[in-house]
Image (cartoon, grey):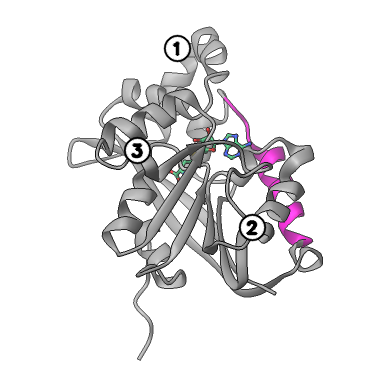
Amino acid sequence: MTEPEINDPLEMLATHVHLDGSVVVDVGSGAGELVRFMRSRGAQPIGVECGEIMLQRALDADPEHPDSYREGVGQDLPVDDQIADAVVFSNSLHHVPATEMTNALKEAHRVLKPGGTLFVTEPIPTGPSFESNRLVDDETVVRGLAQDALAAAAELGFELQSHIEYDGEYSYADAAEWESVLVGIDPTRRAKLDELREVAVQAFYDNATERDGRFAFAQPNDVKVYTRT
Ligand SMILES: C[S@@+](CC[C@H](N)C(=O)[O-])C[C@H]1O[C@@H](n2cnc3c(N)ncnc32)[C@H](O)[C@@H]1O
């Protein structure tokens, strides 16, 4: 029997990370969607986030669990040594400053228990979502640097268990929602968006697929799952 194809990022995570009863550090936890999902599957999630807007969105969406979130960065995790069963980087490693990406992986190693799981999903710089965003922020270089850092993971004490590529999708009600997400993730994008609004919004609609009254964008993803040695 062939395995069913997974293209839901949450199910991809649940397939590769044992969640029930696990302490999981979500590095760059954004608006907290993974934290809430992992808790619903029995995990004790710790979301680490440095963006003020994102941290506030996470707290607003999860008012009964403020203790699930900590302010901090991947390269200096506010987490004790060897307490985590798993560490997750979901679309966040390429947001760590290039000179700190390897340090962020070292920090993941420090907080993981021996035998723990490192799960890293990164967007591949191609496809409609990438094309719609690239005028505002072309991430080709930083996404490549994140892959370079991962290529040296074995030297940091990680053994690669699985490598999967799959097509995910983002969808937005309209260009205003897309703008709000882009700027929430990285507020420095605001200036470029303001400068290029007309062509940037045109690129949004040119690359969108309309479905169920929303604007959808395919995004190929690269997932690597490691065991901490
Ligand atoms: C594209 S968002 C991903 C959010 C969430 N993980 C998800 O998958 O929806 C990238 C996140 O990385 C965060 N980030 C930026 N610099 C970081 C750093 N040095 N360490 C960890 N996260 C960082 C941003 O604030 C942002 O919330």
Quick one: 222 or 30, which is closer to the camera? 30
- Please state, as top left, top right, bottom left or bottom right, where the N terminus lies in the image: bottom left
Residue 52: percent from left, percent from top: 47, 24
Q: What stretch is highlighted in magenta?
A: 137-152
Label 2 neighbour load within 10 Å: few <14, some 14-19, many 20+: some
Dot 3 corresponds to which residue? 66
Residue 190, relative to residue 131: is it above or below?
above
Reading the image, the residue beneath label 2 is 81
Quarter of the figure with residue 222: bottom right
Q: Is residue 149 left or right of residue 74?
A: right
Amino acid carrying mark 3 in the image = Pro
Question: Does the magenta-highlighted stretch encompass residue 196?
Answer: no
Q: Is mark 2 on a helix, strand or loop?
A: loop
Secondary structure that dominates the magenta span: helix
Q: Residue at x 38, y 86 (%)?
A: 2
Q: What residue type is labelled 1?
A: Glu
Q: Position of residue 177 (x, y in %)?
A: 32, 25
**Residue occupying the point 62% across, 44% down:** 77
Ligand 1 within 8 Å of disc 2? The answer is no
Which numbered circle lies on residue 198? 1
- Whole-angstrom CA distance, mark 1 to mark 2, is 48 Å
The tag earlier along the polypeptide, 1 or 2, is: 2
Residue 24, above or below 115: above
